[in-house]
Amino acid sequence: MRINIVGSSGCGKSTLGQHLARELALPYIELDALFWQPNWTPAPDPAFLARITTALSAPGWVLDGNYDRTRPIKWANVEVVIWLDLPAWRILLQVLKRTLRRSLKGEVLWAGNRETLRKALFSRDSILLWAITQLGPIRRRYRAVMADPSWSHIQFVRIQSQQALTALRTDPRAFLTAVA
């Protein structure tokens, strides 16, 4: 099975991705880990796209992340795209909690990077600001791509409630079969 989990920052892509990978015995791939280099330097597109191509060469995987420019590569052979489209209040709460946890604990992220409260909450690069301003555009984009016949080979699953998310987490195979 080849699954891509998408949605806004803080919606729970990584948490769900890691869980599904464990439950389905598939490799877990995080696009942020392929994109970010030391000192929060973005990877140049040729290197980033090459890393994705290599990572997706396995017969099955759970991939988390958006990065629209990667869609032709990641969706060429994907079977299921799970769009975590939870309520805005929940996403913002999750972003805030995650940012506080990472910052206060000094968690090491991709390529040795760390979030700081100042940058994460009080700068133009604020992840909280990003989540707030990008929620609407992300919803418009995914509604459009789900209707695009270019992607008709993909089973799209839109998760809009905690109940649906819990059902998916409880028995992923049964849930994905039921919504097919």
Image: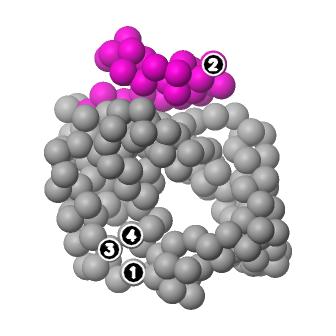
Determine the residue positioned at 25% across, 35% down.
1
Q: Which mark is residue 43?
A: 1
In space, the residues marked 4 and 2 are separated at their CA atoms by 31 Å
Q: Is residue 23 left or right of residue 71?
A: right
Depicted 175 relative to depicted 94: above or below: above
Q: Tags 1 and 3 in contact by the CB under 8 Å rule?
A: yes
**Magenta span:** 154-180
Q: Is residue 150 left or right of residue 30?
A: left
In space, the residues marked 1 and 2 are separated at their CA atoms by 37 Å
Q: Amino acid at mark 4?
A: Leu
| Residue 20 drawn in magenta | no
In space, the residues marked 3 and 4 are separated at their CA atoms by 6 Å
Q: Position of residue 151 (x, y in %)?
A: 24, 38
Q: Amino acid at mark 2?
A: Gln
Depicted 37 relative to depicted 103: above or below: below
Crowd band around label 4 with a 10 angstrom C-alpha radius: few (<14), some (14–19), many (20+)? some
Q: Position of residue 152 (x, y in %)?
A: 23, 31
Q: Which mark is residue 163?
A: 2
